[in-house]
Image (cartoon, rainbow, N blue to C red):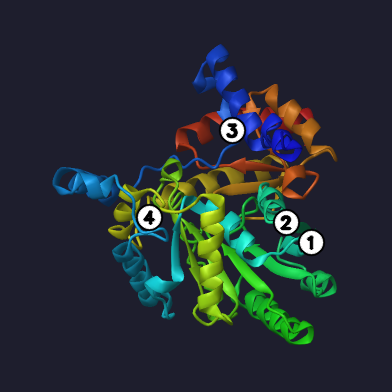
Amino acid sequence: MNQRMYGLGSKCSVIREIFEYGKARAAQVGAENVYDFSLGNPSVPPPQAVEDAIAQLLQGGDMTALHGYTSAPGDLEVREAIAAHIRKTFSFPADAAHLYMTCGAAASLTVSLSAVCNAGEEVLTFAPYFTEYKVFAETAGARLTALPSDPASFLPDLAALEAALSPKTAAVLLNSPNNPSGVVYGEETVKRLAALLAEKEKEFGRPIYLISDEPYRELVYGGVQVPYLPAYYNDTLVCYSYSKSLSLPGERIGYIFVSPRARDAEALYLAVCGAGRALGYVCAPSLFQKVVARCQGMTGDVSVYEQNRNTLLAALTSYGFACVPPDGAFYLFVRSPEADANAFCERAKQYDLLLVPGDDFGCAGYVRIAYCVSPERIARSLPAFEKLAKSYGL
């Protein structure tokens, strides 16, 4: 058997391990007594329009078409609807011929990396980063290198990026709003990064692709704006998922958008199509392609996440924990009171608090708290967090 695949299968991600522990623990002491902050699983229901679209499609639609194959890159009308939304929302040129429907952001990233990477090349990202990036890059035959961020802000260290870029760099992978820090990369950061990559493209005489991982784009607070990366850098691929915006993580639906301004954009799009074919990702779920086409620009109730963020951040800082305030997504990335975040998470389990150590996110000494849970769970968990803080003398 393939020993790499055996290794991936025999040890699941740390997030999933803690999630499974939480289910077992809930069976022992009751779900209401377990404060599981492990998985980024939205608690906010989908907008009513999603339920209405499903009902309308199933009641009045052609069942053969709804449950049958679409074109390999996705239904044409669906891609046209998404392209129209991109043009309207971002004032950026988009058409169906540059969109590829996928089974969520994981598929988008795996396909995009496989499309742009050759064996032995490098993908750069910034820590903290989503734990599966390394798996996705290595599946494409590349090596993932994580660069530091400013610990005071978790914004990218662009001097470190400049030093790391080389003729072997196939892509730079960005995630904003960021999982796990919740930090949003503002326009000034994006402009500086884009200028640096454009300069290095000229120096090396080859494209350096910017892959924008965007499942949390709409989950921002306080009027914060998320720059649309294709507007700042030509050689960009956007990997989008409706898992968080429409609260549809289990339906696995998203897309890849290849910027028409990229060099050889049509050839790049064909490479995306070829990667989707090679990986078996042709024809994303047909029913939910049609559902999201009817729900462009909609979200679940983001104010619930904002309320959770405000409540939890205020409480944890008052207890003595340190955290960079997040502007988006639905995570707090909290500094561990001891150097070993895994030990901190084990102690947290004594209070039935399930947190994820930051080591697999590329940041030792931190823990991720997914606050995409009910406000009631947040409120019930606060005494346990306070006891945990006191156990460290905070």
Gap in Å between the C-alphas at discs 1 and 3?
47 Å
Label 1 or label 4, whichever lies nearer to me, is 1
Q: Are marks 2 and 3 in contact (CB under 8 Å)?
A: no
Gap in Å between the C-alphas at discs 3 and 4?
28 Å
The residue labelled by disc 1 is: 120
Q: Looking at the image, which residue is at 26% across and 48% down?
A: 66
Residue 141: mark = 2
Crowding near the residue tagged with mark 4, few <14, some 14–19, many ≥20 C-alpha atoms within 10 Å: many
Q: Amino acid at mark 2?
A: Gly
Dot placed on the residue nearer the N-terminal end, 2 or 1: 1
Residue 203: mark = none
Along the line of sight, the residue nearer the viewer: 378 or 176: 176
Dot placed on the residue nearer the N-terminal end, 1 or 4: 1
Label 3 or label 4, whichever lies nearer to me, is 4
Gap in Å between the C-alphas at discs 2 and 3?
44 Å
Q: Quadrant of residue 78?
A: bottom left
Q: Amino acid at mark 4?
A: Thr
Gap in Å between the C-alphas at discs 4 and 2?
36 Å
Crowding near the residue tagged with mark 1, few <14, some 14–19, many ≥20 C-alpha atoms within 10 Å: some
Q: Looking at the image, which residue is at 61% across and 57% down?
A: 178
Gap in Å between the C-alphas at discs 2 and 1?
6 Å
Dot placed on the residue nearer the N-terminal end, 1 or 3: 1
Q: Amino acid at mark 3?
A: Leu
Dot placed on the residue nearer the N-terminal end, 3 or 4: 4
* Residue 230 in the image, given as x and y percentages of width and height: 54, 76
Crowding near the residue tagged with mark 3, few <14, some 14–19, many ≥20 C-alpha atoms within 10 Å: some
Residue 299: mark = 4
